[in-house]
Amino acid sequence: MTTKTFQEFFSDNLSEFGWSLSATDIPDVVACSEAIERIGEWWNALDERYRNVFRTADFSQGLYDEGYFSAFPALYTLFAGNPMGHFDKTINDVIICGIRAQHQVDEQADQVSDVNEVVGA
């Protein structure tokens, strides 16, 4: 059985939401998490009134200019144009894809060469 990397799973998961991002454009899980968390911290620091103003706006270029995508440059392409219609929906979908990829890596089974050894026959 061929195992897949976090990046490959993340790329596959993103494609289910309509995004196209190559696994080679995705950094390791730590860099991904840190980049996404940094953007989330910025968003969560806004009070609800400001979030309501910004929710449907595309401010990805401003985040890019301020270095929010420096650890994961391709993340910019996921936010550009606010593809899910609302910033919080977009970031939540990205987070879901990353968490799912982490679980998928952990859930990969080792290859079993003899099923009789597994079932005790």
Image: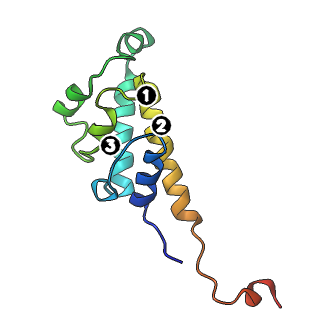
Quadrant in the picture for residue 91: top left
- Residue shown at 39%/39% (left/top)? 37
Which residue lies under the disc numbered 2?
Answer: 93
Q: CA distance from mark 1 to mark 3?
A: 19 Å
From what the image shows, is residue 5 above or below residue 117? above
Locate residue 21, reporting x and y percent: 33, 49
Task: Say what amino acid the circle numbered 3 marks.
Answer: Ala
Front-most of 63 and 1? Answer: 1
From what the image shows, is residue 102 above or below residue 61? below
Q: Which mark is residue 35?
A: 3
Label 3 element class: helix
Q: Earlier in the sequence, mark 1 or mark 3?
A: 3
Task: Say what amino acid the circle numbered 2 marks.
Answer: Asp
Residue contact at pointers 1 and 2, CB within 8 angstroms: yes
Q: Quick check: 115 left or right of 97?
A: right
From what the image shows, is residue 55 above or below residue 95? above
